[in-house]
Image (cartoon, rainbow, N blue to C red):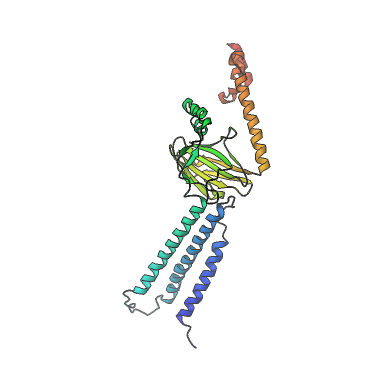
Amino acid sequence: MQQVPVSLWTLVAGIVVTAISIWIGHNHTLMPVQASLQAPLVDSFFNVMFTIAIALFLVVEGTIVVFLVKFRHRRGDDTDGLPIEGNVPLEIFWTAIPTVIVLGLGIYSVDVFNQMGGFEPAGHPHSAAHVAHKSGTAIAATLSDASEATTAPTIAPTIGIGASPQTLNKPADLVVDVKGIQYAWIFNYPDSGITSGELHIPVGADVQLNLSAQDVIHSFWVPNFRLKQDAIPGIPTELRFVATKPGTYPVVCAELCGGYHGSMRTQVIVHTPEEYDSWRTENQIAQQQNLNQVVAINPSDLSTSEFLAPHTHDMGISAATLESLVMSH
């Protein structure tokens, strides 16, 4: 019986390993549901890396198993092994392959990073009115008034994921200022004045998040968007993306920021355009009503029990107990 050549066995093994690696690399369930325009770019890169990892695992572990079986110690065989001192072509081969893989993945990752907008957020023009909104100082407000007669912008350099090549030099559809504090995220909408503890955005809109941190470094991470960006005290950062699927997705702080870091979570709610317009209108009305109530109430016109009534829950007493205490004094 003629023995099968080693080269043929190697070819067959290579075909099998390649087929298994490609199938597993593109049919796994390791990633959450895609919900942004940037997610397929990241997933494609991940699938390539995972395919390569599976192939390397099968080759290395398969070789170990084959060698364990073929070169196992036979009973009664006390001879020494063959004196192998090295194989230069083999050493070049197993050095060249990882080199090519690393260079290829590096070039691919740079292309993905560029398509996501990683090279673009070097600086963005902000009007003096935006500066006034951010600082809240009288000086900035004065600059806002003076800016009505000029169109000269101020440049605020930022880092992060900015405009993609397709949206370069185009303003975002929605801008949200995001502040990280121990241990919560605060979302402010400059165009409507809404402040929320959740991020609400319309599906299909080009959204720009201006990230900042009040105390320590935080990291704004939405797994379903495949996007993560640090919020750094004193250094503005940016995250720009397009949500593609309505739904509610978790927002996680991915940077250890203190003792309650694990509880620094919120959610991003992706609405249809109609639902987003409704949410914005309802919140604008609600916040305006709250502001009017605060302005309309004169504390001097309230009795002691009426003044303290909103705080009874925090004090751990009932309204009836509060009234009796006030009457007794």
Tell me which residue sits at (59%, 19%) in the image. Answer: 308
Q: Residue 299: percent from the left, percent from the top?
A: 59, 16
Tell me which residue sits at (52%, 34%) in the image. Answer: 130
Residue 291 in the figure: left or right of residue 58: right
Q: Residue 319: percent from the left, percent from the top?
A: 63, 20
Residue 107 in the figure: left or right of residue 301: left
Q: Residue 170: percent from the left, percent from the top?
A: 55, 45
Residue that extends furthest to the bottom in the rendered view of this protein: 1
Residue that extends furthest to the front in the rendered view of this protein: 149
Which of the pair 74/168 is nearer the observer? 168
In the rendered view, tell whether residue 252 sits above or below residue 26: above
* Quadrant housing residue 192: top right
Which of the pair 243/318 is nearer the observer? 243
Tell me which residue sits at (36%, 70%) in the image. Answer: 92
Tell me which residue sits at (47%, 76%) in the image. Answer: 10
Which of the pair 328/156 is nearer the observer? 156
Residue that extends furthest to the top in the rendered view of this protein: 329
Q: Quadrant of the C terminus?
A: top right
* Quadrant housing residue 294: top right
Q: Residue 323: percent from the left, percent from the top?
A: 62, 16
In the rendered view, tell whether residue 54 sits above or below residue 122: below
Number of numbered discs present?
Answer: 0
Using the rendered image of the protein, determine whether residue 230 is visible from the camera's viewpoint. yes
Using the rendered image of the protein, determine whether residue 183 is visible from the camera's viewpoint. no
